């Protein structure tokens, strides 16, 4: 099972379709972007959680993916895990370079992924010893 599939399962089956529609990406490009962003976002969430420096109020919310509320929530999460907009922009640029998707589209997907990942982690859907946690540890993240 891919990271994309696991996040989609955590967020609900329509979540990725809603994000793709909002951003204007075909499913294959969204999968590429999410597949590139998710490991980094989840790894940072996990690290900040272990350090006790994750803003749990940001992680505990669970807005509907593909909405303005999810974008706001995701931006709050990104601020908590990356610390600055410059880091988020750098992550978006690197993802755009790696996937061939425009940086503007990646910037729209990034907070949506952060929102889903934070809510899923808070709800225990990412698992501490299975699923995404195993994939990330196997990838050295």
Image (tube, rainbow, N blue to C red):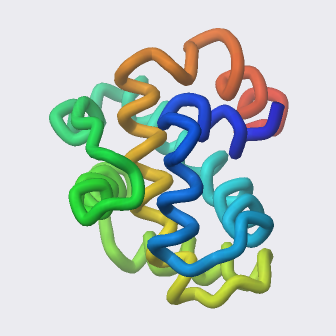
Check the picture and name the quadrant holding the C terminus: top right
Q: Is residue 43 visible?
A: no
Residue at the spot 49% in from the left edge and 53% down from the top edge: 113
* Residue 136 in which image quadrant: top right
- Residue 103 falls left or right of residue 81: right
- Residue 67 falls left or right of residue 69: right
- Residue 80 falls left or right of residue 27: left
Q: Where does residue 88 sit, x and y in percent of width and height?
A: 44, 71
**In this picture, is 57 found above or below 65?**
above
Q: Where does residue 49 sit, x and y in percent of width and height?
A: 38, 28
Q: Nearer the viewer, residue 130 or 4?
A: 4
Check the picture and name the quadrant holding the N terminus: top right
Q: Where does residue 22 sit, x and y in percent of width and height?
A: 45, 72
Residue at the spot 48% in from the left edge and 36% down from the top edge: 11
Q: Is residue 120 visible?
A: yes
**In this picture, is 94 found above or below 17?**
below
**In this picture, is 55 found above or below 131?**
below
Q: How many marks?
A: 0
**In this picture, is 71 found above or below 43?**
below
- Residue farthest along the left direction in this orientation: 57
């Amino acid at each position: 099972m891919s990271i994309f599939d696991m996040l989609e399962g955590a967020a609900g089956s329509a979540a990725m379709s809603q994000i793709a529609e909002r951003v204007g990406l075909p499913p294959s490009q969204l999968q590429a972007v999410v597949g590139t962003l998710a490991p980094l976002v989840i790894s940072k969430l996990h690290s900040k959680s272990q350090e006790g420096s994750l803003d749990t109020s940001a992680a505990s919310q669970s807005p509907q993916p593909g909405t303005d509320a999810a974008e706001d929530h995701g931006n709050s999460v990104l601020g908590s895990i990356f610390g600055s907009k410059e880091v988020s922009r750098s992550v978006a640029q690197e993802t755009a370079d790696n996937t061939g998707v425009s940086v503007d589209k990646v910037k729209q997907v990034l907070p949506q992924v952060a929102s889903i990942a934070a809510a899923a982690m808070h709800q225990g859907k990412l698992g501490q010893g299975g699923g995404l946690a195993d994939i990330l540890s196997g990838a050295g993240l």
